[in-house]
Amino acid sequence: MKHKFFFSILVLLIFLSCINNKKKDALDLNNLGLLDKFDPTSSIIFFTKAIELNPEFEQAYNNRGFKKEILNDYVGALFDYNKAIELDSNYHTAIHNRGVLYFNCKKYDLALLDYNKAIKIDSTLDFYYFDRGVLFFYIKNYYKAISDLNKTITLNPKYSDAYYYKANSYLELKNNNEYLYNLVKAKDMGCQLAKNQYDTLIYYSNELR
């Protein structure tokens, strides 16, 4: 309750101090929505107010779409991502987020198109390659999965989940040495999925002795 009251007071102060500057008001409201990490519904209110003040504010559409996706409002999220991309066709964050939405809805072909577009615009972000690598893993294109996961690791050598999916790609390819090497790397870096899988492997290995 105190949390919501605090943000309501901030919104009121913004409107009183910046009445004649709608774009600045919209930016302030958007930033408040980003600060409010505890309640997606509250964040959506801020982003919606920002959009009302500045209907061409693509970042607010993207941010609202992200919060809607957290609330499983996939139709609403898709609308907002589409609007953000319509306003800026090179807005790779929104393109990537739409790709994640398509992936979660198992529309892998559409997800791949967006992942490719986002990487073409900005090839420096490790999680863009990671997400595409995971997609390739799910559609059983293991060699392409490994390639993207290697790029992820090149950009961020401590990306433990990349080692985990790389390990399981090698497992599907029946390359046990690479599987074990990457699984242990992921485990040692703190990947819980890798730890669980490794512990299960050790358990059954001991049972077979």
Image (tube, rainbow, N blue to C red):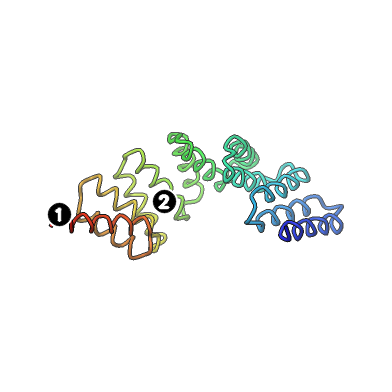
Q: Which mark is residue 85?
A: none
Q: Residue furthest left?
A: 209
Q: What secondary structure is marked by label 1?
A: loop
Tell me the quarter of the picture where residue 163 sits.
bottom left
| Residue matched to label 1 | 208
Instruction: Please indicate whether residue 72 sits to the left or right of residue 203 in the image.
Output: right
Q: What secondary structure is marked by label 2?
A: helix
Q: Are marks 1 and 2 in contact (CB under 8 Å)?
A: no
Of tags 1 and 2, the one toward the viewer is: 1
Q: Residues within 10 Å of mark 1 (few under 14, many from 20)?
A: few
The quadrant of the rendering that contains the N terminus is: bottom right
Frontmost residue, 106 versus 157: 106
Residue 204, percent from left and from top: 21, 54
Q: Which residue is rendered at x = 52% and y = 45% of the image?
A: 96
What type is the residue that disc 2 sits on?
Phe
Q: Residues within 10 Å of mark 2 (few under 14, many from 20)?
A: many
Residue 140, percent from left and from top: 31, 39
| Residue matched to label 2 | 130
What type is the residue that disc 1 sits on?
Leu
Q: Residue furthest bottom?
A: 188
Residue 59, percent from left and from top: 65, 48
Residues under labels 1 and 2: Cα distance? 35 Å
